Image (cartoon, rainbow, N blue to C red):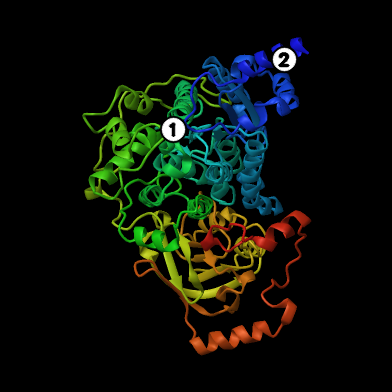
Amino acid sequence: MAFFCIKWIKLFINNATTKKMNNPLRSDESTKGRRMAGARSLWRANGVKDSQFGKPIFAIANSFTQFVPGHAHLHQVGQYIKSIIEKSGYFAAEFNTIAIDDGIAMGHDGMLYSLPSREIIADSVEYMCNSHKADALICISNCDKITPGMLMAAMRLNIPTIFVSGGPMEAGNFGEQKIDLVDAMVMAVDDSYSDAEIADVEQNACPTCGSCSGMFTANSMNSLTEALGLSLPGNGTIVATHKNRLKLFEKATKQLVEITERHYYKGDDTVLPRSIATKQAFMNAMTLDIAMGGSTNTVLHLLAVANEAEVDFTMKDIDELSRKIPNICKVAPSSHYHMEDVNKAGGILSILGELERGNLLNTDVFRVDFPSLKKAIDNYDITRSTANNDAFENAKSGAAHTGRNLKLASQETIEKTLDLDRANGCIRNIENAYSKDGGLAVLFGNIAKGGCIVKTAGVDKSIWEFKGRARIFHSQDAAVNAILNDKIVAGDVVLIRYEGPKGGPGMQEMLYPTAYLKSKGLGKECALITDGRFSGGTSGLSIGHVSPEAAAGGEIALVKEGDEIEINIPERKINVLISDEEMQKRKQEELSKGKEAFKPTGRNRRVSKSLKAYALTVSSADKGAVRLID
């Protein structure tokens, strides 16, 4: 008995915290006390050492998968991060989330699963961290639903967290022209290109690992984490192939260790996600999105992340910002620039620097790396005399353009000159903005009472005011067939409904209809309206997220073939030109169908049980397509 008591006392001492904790460790619940002997035994089987008990346990959420080029290079990254954390004396455990490649899933029913995967990713990170009582979290994300899903989980957990992405792909080359995935899709159905040219484009449009090279959803979201304050400068723009991307993983890991120690040992709660991602931070992130003409999907995701953070950030806030934020950065598909060019111009902190000069940001917000956004901008806006060496090293991290390269941090190209031209360069100052109106706008009207989104950065100004006849489709496939078979003509408004979160279900992206309109020479001649959503690669007069969606009883379901629709971006309006009385009459006619009301007709789509379950609780896009459970 005496021997047992002595052994237990030694065990208790080994498990005692060596430093005083100002905030209790979550992991204490599974590592402390006699009753947790079994759990400790399992922790030891995971590799936990005596010296690591009583200290923070770090979770590494990796999104590695060989299905997605934005993630295929992340296989060893989790273990590299684990080694850095454990050199600091702590235990770290890696786990994986799923990841769907939207480009590969595009154009068939695989895309129905993309947005719902966001909730699965958020749930999986929450499940792993809460079931194992992790004390801190590093999120290795990159592509479309992964970053927002992990952000949603971070807001639920509210433990020290930092984000570090896999980085963007290098742009491809087609002759003297830089190209990307969207170019391949558009050119593939353009008969002016030969089979040989299309084969060349296919070989070169996506030349490296990383997220596709334009300001599509993945790169937009990874840029927004910089503005939110949850990732380090360079996260959104340093290409995946550059050695400084690996250096960024190291910096982010060490920063996470630092803020974790500050929270638990010193009681600093300012480093927590909910202290950082405040209403002001969400406004900053949306300001950046509008200024750089990011993907319309970011609206959907920011609303969802704010919902998880219990922050009152709504479409009304986005609408107000869209009326005053200029478009100061244009990137593919809205220009010839790609993410590597944004990086060469100083990256996201340099865009924020121009916005700060115009008093368009709240710079007092907390961050994971600096006590305020103001400090971060002063250190990383390369046009300022206060910019540090790290800012210039990031900006000089160039793309190699040596062809196929699927290895992380495998090249060391240094840009000889940086883009500091704020009058005509990639990033502009406010005086020389691409347009005084921002890159995104919220429209309201009698078919979008909850609002809808248009990426104005990708719309030719000649069609900011547009009037045309409605062509009604109850699926993306039906619309694509009409476009490719030349049944859509100049002046048509292609209206695709029942593709929203509930109606799809899954709110699939629609890059093909918009790409095919461009390839048919109708990019400036037609409009496309949907309660679904678009890829970040979409451009043209493409209006998505119409809310309420058709399947939720939205007025978009009541538009008839041939109705005249008017779109006015400057006035933020979108309306079908019928009377209120006619609209009400149509609504009553639809409701009279009983169980068949507000359902698509003529559509043969197999919907799995998992998607049916998703449809039961999901909201329309104006709420972020979040689950309505309470």
Dividing the picture into quadrants, the one containing residue 467 is bottom left
Mark drawn on residue 139: none
Q: Residue at x 23, y 44 (%)?
A: 357
Q: Where is residue 405? Give x, y as percent.
A: 56, 25
Dividing the picture into quadrants, the one containing residue 139 is top right
Q: Residue at x 49, y 21 (%)?
A: 19
Disc on the earlier residue, 2 or 1: 2
Q: In which quarter of the image is the C terminus?
A: bottom right
Q: Residue at x 42, y 54 (%)?
A: 458
Q: What element carries label 2?
A: helix
Q: In which quarter of the image is the N terminus?
A: top right
Q: Say whether residue 564 is left or right of residue 270.
A: right
Mark drawn on residue 5: 2
Residue type pointed to by label 1: Gly
Q: Where is residue 154? Give x, y as percent.
A: 54, 41
**Is residue 41 visible in the rendered structure shown here?**
yes
Q: Say whether residue 334 is left or right of residue 529.
A: left
Alpha carbon separation for disc pair 2 and 1: 34 Å
Q: Is mark 1 on a helix, strand or loop?
A: loop
Mark drawn on residue 267: 1
Q: Residue at x 57, y 47 (%)?
A: 185
**Is residue 337 visible in the rendered structure shown here?**
no
Q: In this view, does 151 lie above or below 478?
A: above
Local crowd at mark 1 within 10 Å, few (<14), some, or many (≥20)? Answer: some
Of 354 and 604, nearer the camera is: 354
Q: In this view, does 437 lie above or below 39?
A: below
Q: Where is residue 262? Give x, y as percent.
A: 43, 28
Q: Is residue 234 above or below residue 437?
A: above
